[in-house]
Amino acid sequence: MPPGGFNFSVLARPEVPERTLRAGEVIFREGEPAAEMFLIKSGTVAIRSDDHLIAELGDNEVFGEMALIDRSPRSATALAVTDVTLIPVSEKQFLFLVAETPFFALTIMRVLVHRLRLLNRVG
Amino acid sequence: MPPGGFNFSVLARPEVPERTLRAGEVIFREGEPAAEMFLIKSGTVAIRSDDHLIAELGDNEVFGEMALIDRSPRSATALAVTDVTLIPVSEKQFLFLVAETPFFALTIMRVLVHRLRLLNRVG
């Protein structure tokens, strides 16, 4: 997905503290319970499963949303490839945005469909 | 996805005319422009791409939602495997439901995540 391909400006709010990580740090691990998703404010994040690279994501992309949607454990591990700044989105905030901001719900759906189309093309 | 695994009762409304097809009939073809998604009221539908079976879907499952979400042409062909009864959902109704019924938006997201998890497992 191209950086900036989706508009997640609704997630960047002054009252949400950013989280910074150094290159090489683990953001979350496959199998862990999940309570939040993330918007990448800056930097590169790798999504890996069983030492297989699923995706590299950059500025203005989201990750970790699948576990919030179906309340399953993390299906993959997320690693900071460069120093990164993330905006965390709690499950509560996620559900609030889905309910109050249809554009946000549609944008999350578009991200999921984009990923499905990529996987279908490879498969 | 197990039949009945998702609750799409919000789509079954008396004012929406059902559509019936005979076994073997094409519901839509890969590459066609898209204006609606479908809930399967009864019967079995095959989703195929390039003569490759992507999924077989049954009662209370939806299909055709990807093209509504990202406004792309159909990414696959849908065929009636048995006689089927479908409830069509227009783009307008889909967007209305996303805006007015957060539970519907979340259920569509869950369907997409379910499909992503299946594809990731195979890949």
Image (tube, coloured by chain):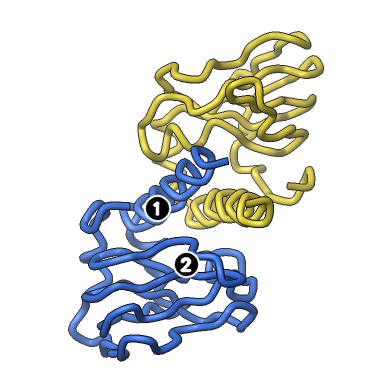
Chain colours: A yellow, B blue
In depth, the one of A76 and B80 nearer the eye is B80
At label 2, counting other C-alpha atoms closer than 10 Å, the crowd grade (few under 14, some 14-19, many 20 or more) is many
Number of disc labels: 2
Which of the 4 quarters of the picture holds residue A20? top right
Disc sitting over residue B111 in the figure = 1
Q: Element under label 2?
A: helix
Rendered view: A8 above or below B58: above
- Callout 1, which amino acid? Val
The residue positioned 27% from the left and 85% from the top of the image is B16
The reply to the same-chain question for discs 1 and 2 is yes
The residue positioned 63% from the left and 54% from the top of the image is A114
At label 1, counting other C-alpha atoms closer than 10 Å, the crowd grade (few under 14, some 14-19, many 20 or more) is many
Rendered view: A108 above or below B16: above
Q: Is residue A13 left or right of residue B95?
A: right
Parent chain of label 2: B
Q: Element under label 1?
A: helix
Parent chain of label 1: B
| Quarter of the rendering occupied by the C terminus of chain B | top right
Residue contact at pointers 1 and 2, CB within 8 angstroms: yes
The residue positioned 35% from the left and 53% from the top of the image is B107
Q: Can residue B60 be seen in the rendering of this structure?
A: yes
Which circle's residue, 1 or 2, is located before the other in the chain?
2
Give the percent coordinates (x, y) of residue A5.
Answer: 74, 51
The residue beneath circle 2 is B65
Specify the farthest residue to the left.
B14
Tell me the CA gap for discs 1 and 2. 10 Å
Q: Can residue A16 be seen in the rendering of this structure?
A: no
Rendered view: A23 above or below B103: above
- Callout 2, which amino acid? Glu
In depth, the one of A120 and B13 nearer the eye is A120
Give the percent coordinates (x, y) of residue A42.
Answer: 78, 27
